[in-house]
Amino acid sequence: MTEPSPCDIMRCDTLVRRLLPQMRAEMVYRLVNERGGISQSEASKRLGISRAAISQYMSRKRGFNREVLPDNLESVIERWVSAVASGEGGTITICDVCRSAEFSGNR
């Protein structure tokens, strides 16, 4: 395995702008559809975003992209879903997204 490249705010910013909306949309969709007992209203409270934003994520009007996310990012999304569903809060960082994308060749 190669060593991660040093943090570069410009690279990370570009990467996050491209991937984070799609990741958030997928996370919200999984949180509401795959985790029993979490309503759209509850998801909006836990994530600190509006109920309308949740509705747009659910209807694929916001953050949807036909690109398939790399497997490394799938695991980050699943960790994010689990953290929000359990009430532990956001344990996913921008660095997690950036590093996972780097290892999957998305830089």
Image: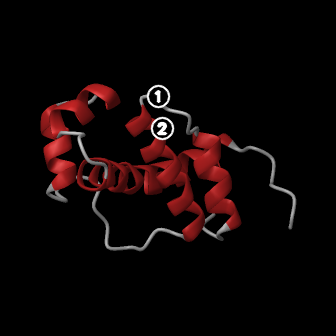
Q: Closer to the N terminus: mark 2 or mark 1? A: 2
Type of the residue with mark 2: Ala
Q: Position of residue 75 (x, y in %)?
A: 55, 58
User: Is residue 65 shown left or right of residue 78?
Assistant: left
User: Does residue 54 appear in this view?
Assistant: yes
Compared with residue 30, is residue 7 higher up or lower down, i.e. above or below?
above
CB atoms at circles 2 and 1 under 8 Å apart?
yes
User: Any mark on residue 89, and which?
Assistant: 1
Q: Quadrant of the N terminus?
A: bottom right
Front residue (pair 64, 31): 31
The residue labelled by disc 2 is 83
Label 2 – label 1 distance at C-alpha: 6 Å
Q: Rate crowding at label 2 as few (under 14), some (14 to 19) or many (20 or more) other CA atoms within 10 Å.
A: some
Look at 49% across and 32% down and name the residue there: 90
Quarter-wise, where is residue 34 in the image? bottom left
User: Does residue 48 appear in this view?
Assistant: no
Q: Position of residue 62 (x, y in %)?
A: 22, 52
Q: Position of residue 56 (x, y in %)?
A: 15, 49
Element carrying mark 1: loop
